[in-house]
Image (spheres, rainbow, N blue to C red):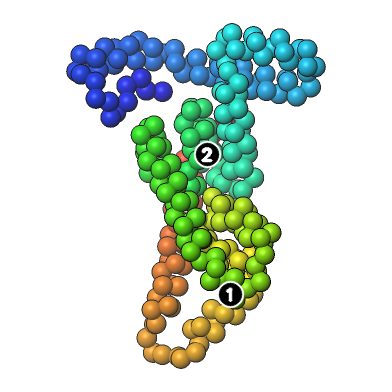
Amino acid sequence: MKLLPTNTKLGEESKQQLTELGNKLKPYLKAYQESRGAIAHIYTHWKTTATEGAKKYAEQFMQDIGISKGYLSKLKTVNDFRQKLIDSGEPASFVNWYESQGIYNQYEMTKIILKDLVMLWQNEMNVSRETLKVLKANCLGDTRRKDEKEDQGLSELKRFINLDNERVSFLKQCIINEKELPLINDLYLAHCWSSLSEESLLTIIKQKISIKPRTELTLFESKLRQIMIEEMDYRESLKAKQQTHPTTTTTN
């Protein structure tokens, strides 16, 4: 938690005063964040079995000590996202790094593309609010561009495929807007993604590269090889990162 943003336009005297305040508060801020998180975590689990009357009084108490409904909502989002990382098999060191970022940053990280999040972890970058703001804007821009391309291609796609409104709705909600599928960014790709089996896709690729056998790689083959090289390098970097960042036990 930084009191002074890196891009502030404050004068030098104001910056110096805020830096002084930040240095005085620093020993206590970590304990405050940990205590606040622990209280919210205990309360969240307690309320699942509490009566309405008990919850009513407890909610007021939580607000009195500075834990708002908004904070609790963010905490739930953070916990759900962390569990998603665990369930998807992400390295324990990556999950631990995510947990170390503080509730605000953890919440903002749920709004960016996973690949960008991994990049921050791999490069051990200082995760500032400014950095997250840029990554969120990039993610939002990608979503807008997807919508534009999708609208342009919809009428053309319907000429070739019997695509009713229910199918379009499914493709948008479950595939195009899925953060883990950033490359599937229009209806045609989404339809192919959900329709083709791996065997069908491999058959098409095999046919593509065997139409005109040549002594040199075609442009398509070069692109295919580059994709595989980049993917293998990415996986090797994850393995190396996991080895250099041994798993540590964390407590909520």
Q: Secondary structure at mark 2?
A: loop
Q: Residue at x 65, y 10 (%)?
A: 60
* Quadrant of image for the N terminus: top left
Q: Which residue is mark 2?
A: 110
Q: Which residue is mark 1?
A: 159
> Which of 229 and 146 lies nearest the eye of the viewer?
146
Give the percent coordinates (x, y) of residue 146: 48, 56
* Quadrant of image for the C terminus: top right
Would you say 180 lies left or right of 14 here? Answer: right
Q: Residues within 10 Å of mark 2 (few under 14, many from 20)?
A: some
Query: In the picture shown, does residue 7 fall above or below 148?
Result: above
Tell me the amino acid under the disc marked 2: Thr
- Camera sees residue 212: yes
Give the percent coordinates (x, y) of residue 129: 39, 32
In front of the other: label 1 or label 2?
1
Q: Quadrant of residue 127?
A: top left
Q: Residue at x 39, y 12 (%)?
A: 25
Q: Quadrant of residue 92?
A: top right
Q: Residue at x 51, y 83 (%)?
A: 208
Q: Residues within 10 Å of mark 1 (few under 14, many from 20)?
A: few
Would you say 38 lies left or right of 182 here? Answer: right
> Which of 15 and 154 lies nearest the eye of the viewer?
154
Tell me the amino acid under the disc marked 1: Arg
Q: Residue at x 41, y 72 (%)?
A: 223
Give the percent coordinates (x, y) of residue 84: 62, 42
- Camera sees residue 251: no
Separation of marks 1 and 2 at Cα, in angstroms: 37 Å
> Which of 170 and 100 lies nearest the eye of the viewer?
170
